Amino acid sequence: MKLLSLLYRLLNPPVKESMDELPGGICCYWPGGIIKLKNRTMEALSFALFGESLMDGEGFWRSLITGAGPAEFLKTGDEPAVRLPDGMVRGFSRDEVRLEGRPLYIVTAIDLTEAYRRNAELTEKQTRTAAMVERQRALNREIGSMIREREILELKTRVHDDLSRALLSGRQYLASSDPSGRRELVRLWEQSVRILRHEGPDEWRDSYENALETARAFGISLKTEGDVPTEAGARALLSSALVCCLSNAFRHAGADAVTLRIAREDGLYRAELTNNGAPPQGPVAETGGLADLRRQLESAGGTMRIQSAPRFVLAITIPKEGEKYGIQSLAGRRPENGADAAGVHH
């Protein structure tokens, strides 16, 4: 009713003259396209968009909703939007009223330039933010790779130190008639030989296979309860957590068995890792591999929690769609003859 009342006032000759001064465009037409009323703004828009005078209201509206003509249409359909050659953006809409016992269509045009400008700025900011987030993730991955390489180097250094100690112990044992050190000597040699047998050229491989290889190299049996993720990103995150726990169990807890429990729940993988080694003497400091693991998990939308007593437990959650975060597998070694890691139980 308000629109119809406005229309009657606009059709009044004195008011109709002032309508031409409106910044917005308006055009009223009968079914079939016969123009009942139009103002100067809508006439100018018709010339700017289609290069002709507005004589057919139906054809004008049809061209707008279908995007016909040389104009730059930002949106078509029931609420079309067009960018004019001067950079202004106009949005159009159509209403239907009844006048003199028959339908009358009213097409209006409003200025959307500022709204589209702000939307374009927001889109640009979102694009820049997304690029910054991706660069941060790439940096986190690079930092993680450097930390893993450092830890691998430290571990290899320790292995070679153990080998030197085994050689020295062997010399002392042979030079001594005391047999009491034989058991420790055998243990040192078995451990050194077991790890050295698997040293070789690094190759890129499946992340979980790399974790199994790590378990074999450490002489740790791995018991897995539940299904290992098949999604590449989630699988890589779980494998990173497993490698971290294997390394810490070998270096700090003296463990020879690690248990991995996995459950699927509402778009997440929930995993717990424990070992049969000595429990931590106090709260576990998140440095090195653990700190890197937390960054990886939280960057992918996961979580991480560490329990120190009465035994060590690493509890994590991993989004199933983790592959979109581009988590990369660790460099590892290919198992001999394609076999799974020895001493690993599924």
Image (spheres, rainbow, N blue to C red):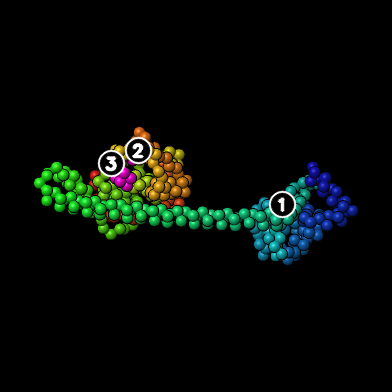
Where's residue 221, x and y in %? 26, 43
Position in image of residue 133 (x %, y %)? 51, 54
Foreground mark, 2 or 3, reads 2
Q: CA distance from mark 1 to mark 3?
A: 73 Å
Q: Give the residue at mark 2.
A: 281
Q: Nearer the viewer, residue 189 or 133?
A: 189
Mark 3 residue type: Ala
Query: What amino acid type should be assigned to the residue bearing mark 1?
Result: Ser
Q: What residue is rendered at 18% in x and 52% in y? A: 168
Q: Which residue shows up at 32% across the image and 53% down it?
A: 154
Quarter of image, res 61 = bottom right
Q: Position of residue 31 (x, y in %)?
A: 75, 52
Q: Is residue 67 visible?
A: no
Q: Quadrant of the N terminus?
A: top right
On residue 255, the disc is 3
Say which label, 2 or 3, has the lower sequence index. 3
Q: Whole-Å distance between the Cαs marked 2 and 1?
A: 72 Å
| Residue at the outermost right position | 14
Q: Which mark is residue 93?
A: 1
On the question of residue 284 being in view, the answer is yes
Left or right side of 331 for 105? right
In terms of depth relative to the viewer, which is nearer, 259 or 206?
A: 259
Q: Secondary structure at mark 3?
A: loop
Which stretch is magenta?
247-261
- Going 43% across and 38% down the picture, which residue do you hit? 265
Between label 1 and label 3, give the one nearer the viewer. Answer: 3
Horizontal side of 331 relative to 137 (left or right) equals left
Disc 1 element = strand
- Whether 256 is among the magenta residues is yes
